[in-house]
Image (spheres, grey):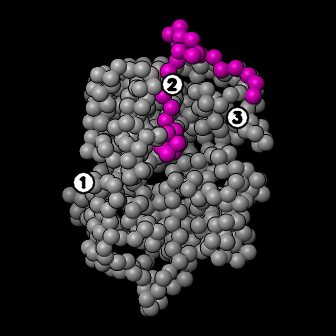
Amino acid sequence: MQGDLSVNIRNIDYQFRNADAFRLQINGLGYPFNGVLGLYGLSGSGKTTFSKLLAGIIKPVSGSVSFIKNGYSAVPKIIYSPQFPEKILLGIHIGDTVQQIVSRNLADDGVYDSICNYLQKFSLDFDKIMDKSGFELSGGELRRLAIALSLALSPDLLILDEPTIGLGRKGKNQLYDILEEFRQQHHIMIVSHDFNLIRKICGHYWILHQGNLIFTGNLKALEFRPDIVEKVGINALENYFTENVKTEEMKTR
Amino acid sequence: MRIRISDLDFHYKKSSQLFKDINLEIPLNSLVIVTGNSGSGKTTLLKLIAGLLEPVTGRIGFELNGKRREDIHFGYLFQNPDDQIVHFNIERELAFNLENRGVPSAEMRIRVEDALREYDLAERRDDSPNYLSGGEKQRLALAGMMISNPDILILDEPCSFLDINAQIQLYRRISELRKQNVSIIWISQEIHEIRMADYVIELEQGEVIWQGKSADYLKTIEGAYAG
């Protein structure tokens, strides 16, 4: 394990400069990372903004986010893998992009073996894609490349924003296997609007609603909060399909 | 009513062959799902159909209510909404498609208002799309496409960034359109979406490995996804 890691959030407030409709406000929150953490919420609830604040990519207007690593206050290595994987494309070819990301993160040459290794687990061959432009890769291929790069950089905390979009069934299963192994050594946070994904991989959940954190806890604790389950639509899809089947049945009777 | 693809060859510049000798008929006036693993050619096939890419050789012909190819109005929803959004303001973004089609301004105003309400964007009408979340952007892109009532809807994983409420709204809308026999071609890898379709095409590494009624497709894969 890379060591114990906990986060301390104090009254953070964040707003985009030119958009009044959205505001993220998180009061006090202390959390020791343990197992895989899931951040769930509807569209526009603030998931991506909150993740970027945690990763230090953006700064809150007020309040603070601090970390304690192995008992000492520290700046941990956090990698945020974006929901739009095109955002990682920096160079003309995939090879350039990988080289730039590796050098920006001051990673050693061993990281290339690690990238190839993770790509292989995702059925992608680095040698075959390195000379391609990013726009020749499919959405799913780009996603797998972005995730493989993030894993290879071996962060203390890996934040994956909507990691399964575009992956398909095979890619999703490969990702689950990879994360199962990766979590033995690293802390992981999954950000998604898909609660089935969160439920499958994560042991602890944070739920955001309209810029506020309305729940922290595990599945058992969530079962005691039917109001929250309802508010953030956790069972809505299942209910929609069951209702549809019932209506169809009534019609055929 | 169908799309007929004959002897289609396609590859991206400098890349190896993706499609070779594809012959395929896609029924129109129905809901067709194109499925397959990542990199199998789903998006490329749809871009070829919509005319966003040109075949290297081969032909894509349309039989749709006697319309000529150039009169068929495609609505294409990209996998990544950032590829679609052009304006700095949500209201203008919705009007863009109608402006380009020469819709009179009085009618345009009504349709933009309807879309803002229907797609739950009214509160943010003056915001820049840059400040929307991934799911909200996808909802805006969808609204911007649907606003001009296309003849053929092409949806590339339209639900990927949509949250549960927006997904259910989209399913309702698609069921409605399907009842009205609107042609929809939809890329999906989700079983519950395949259940909603009339017809399924599965691609694997540039080859069509399955095509037929969705009920039959579901039977063939039932074993693999039991439970």
Residue A134 percent across, percent down from the top left = 66, 50
Front residue of A183 and B65: B65
Q: Position of residue A164 (x, y in %)?
A: 51, 54
Q: Quadrant of residue B105?
A: top left
Mark number displayed over residue A231: 1
The structure residue drawn at horizontal position 60% and vertical position 68%, both measured from the top left corner, is A151
Q: Secondary structure at mark 1?
A: helix
- Kind of residue at disc 3: Glu
Secondary structure beneath dot 3 equals: strand
Q: Are marks 3 and 2 in contact (CB under 8 Å)?
A: no
User: Dot 2, how many residues are within 10 Å of its Cα: few (below 14), some (14-19), or many (20+)?
Assistant: some
Q: The magenta stretch spans which residues?
A: B56-84
Alpha carbon distance from label 1 to label 2: 36 Å
Q: Which residue is mark 3?
A: B207
Q: Secondary structure at mark 2?
A: strand
Label 1 close to label 2 by CB (< 8 Å): no
Which residue is at a point 49% across and 56% down the rendered structure image?
A: A83
Q: Is residue B205 left or right of residue A167?
A: right
Q: Earlier in the sequence, mark 3 or mark 2?
A: 2
Disc 1: which chain? A
